[in-house]
Image: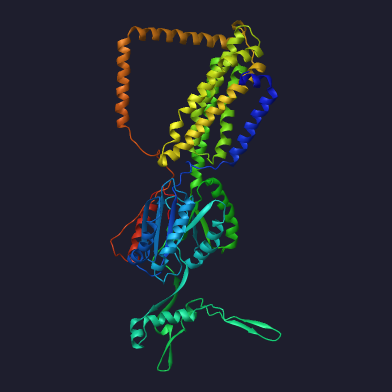
Amino acid sequence: MSISELFIKRPIMTTLVMAAILIFGIFAYTLLPVSDLPNVDFPTIQVIAQLPGASPETMASSVATPLEKQFSTIAGIDSMTSSNALGSANITIQFNLSRSLDGAALDVQSAISKAASQLPPEMPTPPSFQKVNPADQPILYLAVSSPTLKLSDVDEAAETTMAQNISMVNGVAQVSVFGSQKYAVRAQLDPRALASRQIGINEVTAALAAGNTNTPTGTLYGKTNTFTLLSNGQLQNAAQFGPMIVAYRNGSPVRLNELGRVIDSVQDDKSASWYNGDRAVVLAIQRQPGTNTVEVVNGVKKLLPRLEAQIPASVKIDTLYDRSESIRASVNDVKFTLLLTIALVVMVIFLFLRNISATVIPSFALPMAIIGTFSVMYVLGYSVDNLSLMALTLSVGFVVDDAIVMLENIVRHMEMGKGPMQAALEGSREIGFTILSMTISLAAVFIPLLFMGGIIGRLLHEFAVTIGVAILVSGFVSLTLTPMLCSRFLKHQAASEHGRFYQASERLFDAWLRGYDWSLKKVLRHKFATLMVSFVVIALTAVLFLQIKTGFLPDEDQGLVFAFTEARQGISFRDMFELQQKATAVVRSDPNVLNLI
C-alpha cells in the first residue's frame, strides 16, 4: 500500500490532518515576531564605568586600561573597543558567534571583579555591563520638552518617570538618554576669596560631604516607648547650600557663599540636545534580541498616555522616529508580493487546465504549504521578515509543481476510461515515488546554505530552512490531499463537451505548439550556430557578473540620516554650541526634513 492510497481511502483522516496543519499554522503566524531581517545578534557586551570629573585621558589610563587587561584574558573575543569621555568610559566587547552570551556575561563579571583593586577608589559605583549590542539601532526616539519648565524638571520627568516605566515594557532592552540634564548644585569658588581666608579646595570638598548627609542617627529605648531618631541633613537647592559653614577663621565661621557663587544647575552642563531647534531630552529605546519590533513599539505607545498623566502638563512628548513604520511598510510590500504571486500561479494553472475543479485541487497545495511552514518557523524561533517572506514567495513556484504532476497523471488515467477512484489510486501509485524524489532533491538544494558560517550564514539559515520546509510540506500535501480530492471531486470531460473558451484557448495552444515545433526544427538544423550563441551568452554572463556591484544587503531607505559634526580641538562648549546651532539651521532649511535632533 502506498502513502497516497492510505489517505485516499480515509478522507476524514486526511481532512483532519490538513485541518490540524491549518490551525497550528494560523495560530503560529499570529505569534511570530515581525522584523525587517532575521535576528542575527553578535554576542556583544557593553561595559560602562564612571568617574565624575576625570578627563578622557585619566579615564583611559586609570579605568579603561585595567579593565581591558582583564577582558583580554576571556576566550572567544573577536574585538574590543573603548571610548573615553569626560567622566565616563565605554568598553564594547564583541564575541564570536559560537560563544554563548550568558557565558560571556559571567566571564565579564568575573573580570570586572578582578580589576576592582586596580580601579580608582573615588569611583562612585563599580563598572556595570549590559547584554545589548550598541550597534543596534534604536527602534523609537522620543523627544521630551517643555516651553515653560526648566530642563532639569524636564529631565526628571524623562528619566525618572518615563524611562523607568518604558524599560519595564515587554521587549525593551534599554532606554538611552541623550542630553541628560539632571539637577545639581554648583559651587563656583573664587581663588582670591579662598587665598585670603587660607582655605583649600579640599576643605570645601570635605565640608560639602559632611554637611550634606542622610545617615541613620540611632534609636532611643525607654521603658514604654522606642524612638527612632531622624536627622536628615540633605540640602536640596543652592539657597540651602549657601549658608553652609566651611571652616572657622579667627573664631568666625566662613560660609560657602562667601567663597564664591552657589547656583542651581545640572550635573553635566557641557552637553545639550535639541528637538527641532528647541532644547529637549531625547529617549532612545532599544529592543531585546528576538522580540517583535512592532509589538514593542505598540507597547511603548500604549503606555505613553498614562505617562503623560503622571508628568507635568506642560511637558510635551514627540515621536521623532518610529522604526516599526518602515518595517510594517516593508513586510506589507512582501506580503502583497506573496499574495500576488499566488494569484498569478493559480491563474496560470487555470489558463492551461481550463477546468475549475482541476484548478482548485492543486491550488490547495499553496496555502497548505505556506501556512504549514509558519508552525515550523515558530518552533525554531524565526520571525516574519523580508528574508523569510521572500523564501515563501520563491517557494510558490516550487510547491505547486508536485500537485500538478500528481493531478496530470490522475487525469491521464481518467482519459483512459477509468473512474475517479481507480484513476486516483493507480495514478498516485505510479507517480508517488517520483514526487517524493522531486521534493527531497529540491529541498536538498538549500542544504549547503545551512552550513555557511559568519553573519551571512546566520542570515541565510532562516531563508534556507523556510523554503525547504515549504517544499517538504507541499510534497506531503501532494501525496495525501491532492489524490484524495481527485478521487472525490475531479471530473473528466471529453473535448466535445467543453465550451467556447476551452475551444478558443485550445486553438491558441495548438498555435503555440506549432510555433515551438518550427523553432525547434530550425535550431536543430543549425547546431553549430546554436552552440556559438550559447557560448556567447555564457561569456556575457561572466563579464557582467564581474562588473555588477556587490554588497552585503540591498539598500533600504528608512528615512533616517545620522550626521556627525567636528570642530577644532580644544574648542569651548559655548563656541561649539553656536556652531551646532548654525549647522542645525542649515539642515532645517531643507523642506524634506521632518524632524531633527
Name the quadrant of the C terminus.
bottom left
Residue sitting nearer the eye, 508 or 464: 464
Query: Residue farthest to the right?
Result: 224
Q: Residue 162 at what x, y percent from top left?
A: 54, 60
Rendering colour mode = rainbow
Q: Residue at x 54, y 20 (%)?
A: 435
Give the answer, above or below, for where 163 lies relative to 340.
below
Query: Residue farthest to the left?
Result: 568
Give the answer, above or below, for where 142 lies relative to 58.
above
Q: Residue 384 at what x, y percent from top left?
A: 53, 39
User: Which quadrant of the figure has residue 93?
Assistant: bottom left
Q: Residue 283 at what x, y percent from top left?
A: 48, 57
Residue sitting nearer the eye, 174 or 456: 456
Q: Residue at x 42, y 37 (%)?
A: 452
Q: Residue at x 50, y 36 (%)?
A: 388
- Residue 320 seen in render: no
- Residue 106 seen in render: yes
